[in-house]
Image: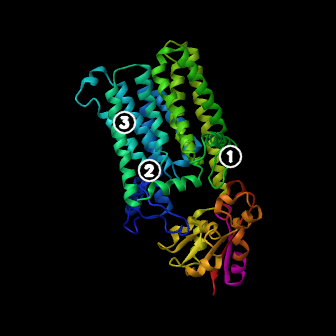
Amino acid sequence: MMETGNMSSTEYFFDLYDRSPHAVKILFHTVESGWIALFGYSIQTIRMLSLLCGTAALFLLYQVIYKVTKNRWAAILGMFLMSVDVQYIYVSHTARQEIWLVLILLIALNLVIKSFFAPTYMHNAKWRYSSDAAVGLVLGFSFGFHPNGLVILFPILGYYIYYLFLERKPILKKHLIFIGVFGLTASVFLILSFIFNSHFISDYAAYGESLGVLESPGSKLSGWLVFYKKIFYQVSGTYYTPNIRPQFFFYGLTLLVSLLTAVFKPDSRKRLIPLLIGLAGMQMAFILIGRYGQPSVVLNLPVLVIIAVATITELLGKNRNNRIKYAGIVCCVLVVLGYGLFTIFQIREEVVQNSSYDEYLNEIAVRIPSDSKIVCNINAEPLFTYGSLYDWRNIGKLSESDISFSQYVIDRDIEYIIYPEEMDFIYQHRPLWNGIYGNIAPIYNGMQDFLNTHCEEIGTFSSRTYAMRIVRYQQERDWKITLYRVIL
């Protein structure tokens, strides 16, 4: 988008994929483009933007919990709980959209709680619906970052549903303003998508079908169960999936306790029930969308933390015996310390075992000029000039397009090939890992013949992380990357 000056541009390195322009992530790309223009294009600068979002989200979480519980210590506890969570640390430095959605969710929660928990005199003020309009605006903007904006909509809807149907307050106008502003803002991205591509609906539906979005409700429900099962057992392809089993048990227990608290302690309901409705709605949204990417599980985390801390605050209220309070405080401190130590252990293990990204880039940079036409994985893209890189994921489309590997290389004047050993592994274990590059079996032998007869090996090096992207096998051994110069 920065290079072409066209906001409807798609990724140049996926030249065999049917790329359909749309505006669903346009704000994310616009913000990143502005950041890159200011601070340069490198993995460090892009990840710094995610880190800033993650830091801001912690401050907003503190505010939300304080507004819900009226207890600063509870707010500090929640902030620490999320800050030491390994999955939160992960999304706070990966330059993906999930941390933006977390930030937007917490901004919206701050606004909606301000709207419903405002003092009585504010309900007659001139700007008494401004928070509802702001919530709709913020959540509408979320669709400019990712389609999972639908997921973070539900924690907000939890408050509107609770106060409309359970509290039975005459506040229909608040709901209509929120829905109206949200609908208008979200529709901007729909209209832009039609401007970019008049066949947006059919093209986006076709893309979604390839990802299982158009499956039957029963299939989506079973996919949702498999989604959490895979996360529990750390099963994934190329996504890093940390061990969060302790979180499953802790938040599962607090959810059960929060339900019982809401049943037997009526004055806790306005604090707990909207959040519980919202969390349930998030799961419905996951099922409705039907695309279960492992990083998206972090969207649950802020709501789970708020529910957990609000429940603890209810259980350790003012009327409790001091011994019970002190025991509860000690337990909370131990939970935070335990999470922190467990996270440090996992991060240390990853840092020790993983290959250095800078070393990976340096091994390539000393052998291949930056203006060369090249086939390699997208993780080497910062080294090369715009338009010169072709991603390996195109090769899964070669047989569908009736193109041989040699023809693909020759037609694009490709000069170098960076060949990761994972290609051989995927072929040998076909079709288990066809989800990484597609089915490479039809072109594999022809690709090997081309590499052996029309390429010159100019170097090899080992990289556990970048020569093998399938996470479960990365640390089994040193995997090899071979650099070839094409000679025709």
**Vertically, is 79 above or below 314?**
below
Along the viewing direction, whichever of 91 and 376 lies nearer the viewer: 376
Numbered range of the magenta stretch: 447-466
For the residues labelled 1 and 3, the Cα–Cα distance comes to 38 Å
Horizontal relation, residue 132 to residue 476: left or right: left
Q: Position of residue 250 (x, y in %)?
A: 62, 31
Horizontal relation, residue 413 to residue 425: left or right: left
Along the viewing direction, whichever of 191 and 346 lies nearer the viewer: 191
For the residues labelled 2 and 3, the Cα–Cα distance comes to 19 Å
Q: Quadrant of residue 63?
A: top left
Element at badge 3?
helix
Q: Visible in this render: residue 478?
A: no
For the residues labelled 1 and 2, the Cα–Cα distance comes to 27 Å
**Type of the residue with mark 3:** Ile
Q: Residue at x 47, y 51 (%)?
A: 50
Q: Are marks 2 and 3 in contact (CB under 8 Å)?
A: no
Q: The N terminus appears in which quarter of the rendering?
A: bottom left
**Type of the residue with mark 2:** Phe
Query: Disc 2 designates what residue?
Result: 145
Q: Residue at x 46, y 59 (%)?
A: 45
Element at badge 1?
loop
Residue 315 included in the magenta stretch of the image: no
Q: Quadrant of residue 361?
A: bottom right
Query: Disc 3 designates what residue?
Result: 179
Q: Residue at x 50, y 40 (%)?
A: 151
Disc 2 crowd rating (10 Å Cα; few below 14, some 14-19, many 20+) is: many
Query: Disc 1 designates what residue?
Result: 234
Q: The C terminus appears in which quarter of the rendering?
A: bottom right
Q: Residue at x 46, y 44 (%)?
A: 149
Mark 2 vs 3, N-terminal side: 2
Q: Position of residue 257 (x, y in %)?
A: 59, 22
